Amino acid sequence: MRIGFGYDVHRLVEGRRLILCGVEIPYELGLLGHSDADVAVHALMDAILGAFALGDIGKLFPDSDPKYKDADSMGLLRVVIERMRDEGYSLGNLDITIIAERPKLAPYIMQMRECLAGAFGCELSRVSVKATTEEGLGLAGEGIGATAIVAINNIN
């Protein structure tokens, strides 16, 4: 078994869509980034890559490469999942915590879990997504952060 941890933060800005775990959340602000800035999926990819000591998503998908401009993070996640499978591993489980003062994310959590479970081709019970605030501290409404932990099992 391998375990990985990921963390990412993006600033909220006008003129961008808000996408978390592959789900578009209706909101007047979105996350700033070179890709679609899905901060939760970025943390998840970093966790998987970290489990294999392969660096982070900036190494695999550099923001200096124009082909990743506005890239779909779920598409990038599929590349990372394929690398994991090529190494002979499958997802044991994942746990993501999204840190956001706003908007309220509770109505979208199940859809986020379903989207991620679909990408991995696994049971919903292996995918946990939670949301919390920092009580006006830390990010304090300026952005959204996410942490992710994965357990990955050898299938050989």
Image (tube, rainbow, N blue to C red):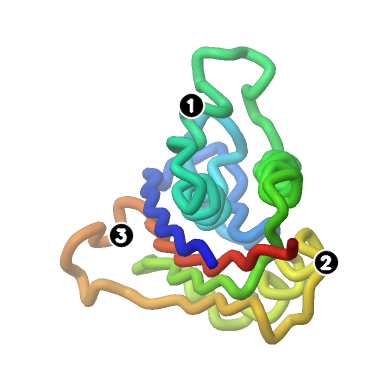
Amino acid type of the residue tagged 3 in the rendering = Gly
How far apart marks 1 and 2 lie (CA) works out to 26 Å
Instruction: Where is residue 34? Give x, y as percent.
Output: 53, 28
How far apart marks 1 and 3 lie (CA) works out to 28 Å
Helix, strand or loop at label 3? It is loop
Say which of marks 2 and 3 sits in front: 2
Q: Residue furthest bottom?
A: 125
Amino acid type of the residue tagged 2 in the rendering = Gly
Q: Name the residue under label 3.
A: 141
117 lies above or below 4 = below
Mark identifier at residue 59: 1
Query: Neighbour class for label 3 at 10 Å: few (<14), some, many (≥20)?
Result: some
Say which of marks 1 and 3 sits in front: 1
Sequence-wise first label, 1 or 3: 1
Nearest to the observer: residue 122 or residue 75? 122
104 lies above or below 140 = below
The residue drawn where x is 75% and y is 66% is 115
Look at the image and tell me in which quarter the C terminus lies.
bottom right
153 lies above or below 106 = above
Residue 67: quadrant of the picture = top right
Q: Name the residue under label 2.
A: 121
Instruction: Where is residue 138? Give x, y as percent.
Output: 19, 61
Helix, strand or loop at label 2? It is loop
Query: Neighbour class for label 1 at 10 Å: few (<14), some, many (≥20)?
Result: few
The residue drawn where x is 49% and y is 37% is 54
